[in-house]
Amino acid sequence: SFTGTKALSWMGSADTLTTRWTVKTKGKEAALVTSVDTFNVTFIRKIAVGIKDNIIPTEFYVNQNYPNPFNPSTTISFGLPKESFVDLRIYNVLGQEVAVLIGNQLRQAGNIQVKFDASVFASGTYIYRLKADNQVVVKKMILMK
């Protein structure tokens, strides 16, 4: 029995997922649903193939940095399905380049983690831009001191 908001979570895997939420009561109690919100959940599958520790992703991906917000460092992780030239740069909100983490270097296929130490930077929003061969991904991160 509860009053207020009930948070529900689940784990699973499927190509598509349809779910229905039901409010049930026991006995003569009444349940009142005051609003129904529609929401979308996107599952991104990162299937990998490989042997033991040498796992190679089947597609290119760039994760959101973690932690975010961060202080003073964060990790940017990405996956390369094939050997690629990689360029990873950090920009401030004015579009000025403030750091080069990987400068157009050839990297082997696999899952890669790069640590960004921002201890000399001011608090604020920063952008990281990762280019691998002909693909470019841009994401936002927040430094909070």
Image (cartoon, rainbow, N blue to C red):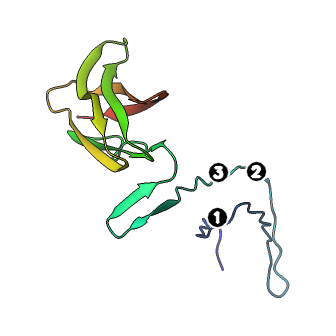
- Residue at (66% x, 53% y) in the render: 41
- Residue at (20% x, 39% y) in the render: 72
N-terminal label among 2 and 3: 2
Q: In this view, does 89 lie above or below 14?
A: above
Disc assigned to residue 37 = 2
**What amino acid is at disc 2?**
Asp
Tell which of 102 and 123 is nearer to you: 102
Tell which of 112 and 117 is nearer to you: 112
Judging from the image, what secondary structure is the residue with disc 3 in? loop
The quarter of the picture where residue 119 lies is: top left
Q: Where is residue 137 in the image (x, y as percent from the top left)?
A: 47, 31
Q: Position of residue 60 (x, y in %)?
A: 48, 43
Q: Name the residue under label 3.
A: 42
**What amino acid is at disc 3?**
Thr
Q: Is residue 42 above or below residue 97?
A: below
Asked if residue 59 shows in the view, the reply is yes
